[in-house]
Image (spheres, helix red, strand yellow):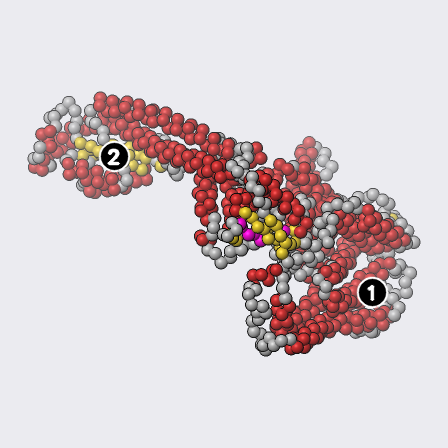
Amino acid sequence: MGDEYPSLLRSEEMSLVQLFVPTEVAHDTVAELGELGNVQFKDLNPSVNPFQRSFVGEIRRIDEMGRRVRFFSTQIEKEKDVVPIRPLYDSAPLITSGPRAAQTVDELDTTLAEHEQRLTKMNDSYQTLSERTKELIEARHVLRETAVFFDKAQGHHEDIRSSFDDTVTPLLQDDREGGYAPAGVQFDLEFVAGTIERSRMSTFERVLWRVLRGNLYMNHIDIAEPFVDPVTGVETRKNVFIIFAHGDALLAKIRKVAESMGATLYPIDPNADKRSESLREVSNRLEDLQTVLYNTGLNRRAELIKIGESLRSWQDVVKKEKMIYETLNLFNYDVRRKTLIAEGWVPTRDITNIQLALRSATEGSGTSVPPILHELRTSKTPPTFHRTNKFTEGFQTIMDSYGISAYQEINPGLFAVVTFPFLFAVMFGDIGHGVIIFVAALYMIMVERKWAKADLGEILGQFFFGRYIILLMGLFSMYTGLMYNDIFSKSLHLWQSGWTFPDANGTVVGVATDHRYPFGLDPAWHGAENGLVFTNSYKMKMSIVLGVIHMTFALCLQVPNHFKFKRYSDLYSNFIPQFIFLQSIFGYLVVCILYKWSIDWSKATTQPPSLLNMLISMFLSPGSVEPSLQLYRGQGTVQVILLGMAGVCVPWLLILKPYLAWKEMNKTQGQHYMGIGHGDDTGDDVPQLTPGISLEEEEEGNGLLQTEDDEHEHHDFSEVIIHQVIHTIEFCLGCISHTASYLRLWALSLAHAQLSEVLWTMTIEGFLGPTSVFGWIELLVMVGFWFAATVFILCIMEGLSAFLHALRLHWVEANSKHFEGGGHAFAPLSFASQEGKD
Amino acid sequence: MPSILPVLFAFAGTAGLMTAAALFVPKGPQQVTIRTALMLTLASCYLMWMVTYMAQLNPLIGMWFKDA
């Protein structure tokens, strides 16, 4: 019964299929089906813990490989300017299906482990070497600066010697003094040298001063360059210090204080020659280390480049394998026959494709037993699948955001392809702005191949996803701009105007001629004092007309749904009363609007009546219409009839459906009692009709279903009544509020036109007709500013606003008239959908 | 005296084009989409033109400008 071609009108027909897959060919089968992207697998082991499933070991191994690949990815991220990553479409593919699959995966595992080991070792040695380098640099600084101190201190030694002699001689009886050469060649006060962070310097000094009671001589100097921590990249500034003091105890105290404050101490020899020798040694070691560091860096980069060549294909393999094994975990393992049993939803149209895929998987893996596909009959609701292409995808997505359509219900996304851009354009109407967004969308479409692979970021990615929507929005905006006769707030005089202006002094009054501007708003209105009065009236009435027609169209979409689901009673219990209610009030209003426009009031006997007052008095004083405010003869009677029809519809809508449901319930209840005793109907569990058939096999289709319906009838009746009451109130009140809601079409187009005009008058208008060079420059600057404001405020901001309101009109005003929703989307196993993500 | 004939002619024209779209869109996987889109475009463009034309057919208010 399949149609020749898929259509977007309804969800595709879906079948539940069962696959019997021999174990040897299972991996390859799932790989083929994943490439095809047409099967949504069901979980046949829902009660099994994820850690107890059959393929847990393989998944663990893949996870380990995935972790390694992620590690490589982060390492390359840090050096992404230098290390190129070969994109996936350029990389050599890794074949993971077929007879050599297991070997390939094993090799990959080993390769990844090796790379990881080498990379971590290089990273560790790099870090160690960097730390050593830092220490050596500090030591070099210390050596250099202390040379200066020693020279300075040489001059002070006499003062210090004398102070020792004066006050502390009794305490210096120990042999420390004896160790020094007297009045010597060499000043030999002991000292401590090292480095400390600059911020801690003053605290250090103060603490030392207090602890040692001033018995110290300290000097310090800044190190000019900061030290960069290789791991974190944080900069620290350090100072070199040297402290001269006398006595072991003091020196020990100094050392302890230094360590507690986080200073690093370096052993310095008091001998100048030895110092310069150490300096040379340190410099040499530093040079060596820096060479080694450089080489390590080069090696690491080379390793990363090698990894970068294959990184994307590894990521791809890891992702696919993980998905395959997770899917295999959903299958049921039949130990006896060594097969896996899978169940899933597929579009009926694609069953032949799937069988081909199964066959090719068997051939690829070299076994002779192909997987068997067999359809099941079921009463479960299939997932909803709308087959879209790159053009319709955007429209379907924005309508799906409201709710997924029920299976086989009329798809509002199909009609949104035109109604959405059209309603947008009614709110956005400007030829110039339409051209801007049309060109932008056209550009995105021309580079779509390149951009589809690139990572565009969230915002640009959203715009790119909706490029076809924007294209149509621009196209329709050009048309509505022509209707409103608005191009960047100016009017076009394409045809002859319908108004002439006879010469007059004072107020200029237009006189209507016999000719009417054939296409769009007459340009004479542009700049008129009461131009807005006319335009507002025109746009408001147009909004009502378009709104009522849109709602009627949406209401009529109910009819195919009722036919498809064989709910013929809904036609006359739901659809007809709703239709009559909507048309008798608001359809009548639309007819009156059009009628009032078609009468030449200059030749009529009465004054043109206000339609809004007419509608209100239709309700408040039905049947009586004041003759001076009459729109047509016999209006009173007609209005009473219409009001009566609407009045009848409310109880009709409210009562008929529950009544029919009640009648149905009584009928089956009678039948129910005539059957073999099923026990009383106090809502017991569904009785097991035939022992031995478990609930899992209800998919096979047997008579169990019939009884279920009967049991539910009791509970459903009160639900039917409540549902119908809500539905009636919602519909009737909704008619009024939704009709008024369409006035947003007027409001937004007014705002847009006014914004556009204000922008023009405040920027370019004042600078037109430049006389001097300066005037030309000013004009150019203003044009630039005007264009930027046009794009950002009028196109982007107003565009987003109109987009939102048009979408709301579709979701609330239109969908509430026919949409049922409640479906679940078809989510097939598909490798392609994962490729875009990282 | 501006007449309502253009409205009726355009209606007939649009109806004709819509019928043509309904009958002559070639069969293929996109037939339903193209057919629906064409018919809806023709209908909505006609509606908007019709409303704009009829609103100006018999002007209810005069047009006046302030002294230029």
Q: Is residue A630 above or below residue A516?
A: below
Task: Name the residue at 59% across, 62% down.
Answer: A698
Residue A434, image x and y in percent?
72, 44
Q: Is residue A733 above or below residue A450?
A: below
Hey, which quadrant is residue A738 in on the image? bottom right
Mark 1 secondary-structure assignment: loop
Q: Is residue A15 above or below residue A361?
A: below
Q: Is residue A817 visible?
A: no
Name the one closer to the observer, A308 or A21.
Answer: A21
Q: Is residue A341 magenta?
A: yes
Q: Which residues are magenta?
A: A339-346
Mark number displayed over residue A609: 1
Name the one closer to the observer, A254 or A59.
Answer: A59
Q: Disc 1: which chain?
A: A
Name the one closer to the observer, A611 or A154.
Answer: A611
Residue A371, image x and y in percent?
58, 47
Task: Name the residue at 32% across, 37% down.
Answer: A198
Q: Is residue A308 left or right of residue A493?
A: left
Mark 2 secondary-structure assignment: strand
Residue A121, image x and y in percent?
37, 34
Circles 2 and 1 in contact, beta carbons < 8 Å: no
Q: Residues within 10 Å of mark 1 (few under 14, many from 20)?
A: few
| Mark nearer the N terminus (2 vs 1) | 2
Q: Is residue A715 left or right of residue A221?
A: right
Q: Is residue A118 visible?
A: yes
Q: Disc 2: which chain?
A: A
What is the distance, in whole Å, between disc 2 and disc 1 at their CAs?
A: 100 Å
Hey, which quadrant is residue A789 in on the image? top right
Mark 1: which amino acid?
Pro
Mark 2: which amino acid?
Leu
Task: Name the residue at 45% across, 43% down.
Answer: A61
Residue to which mark 2 is pinned: A265
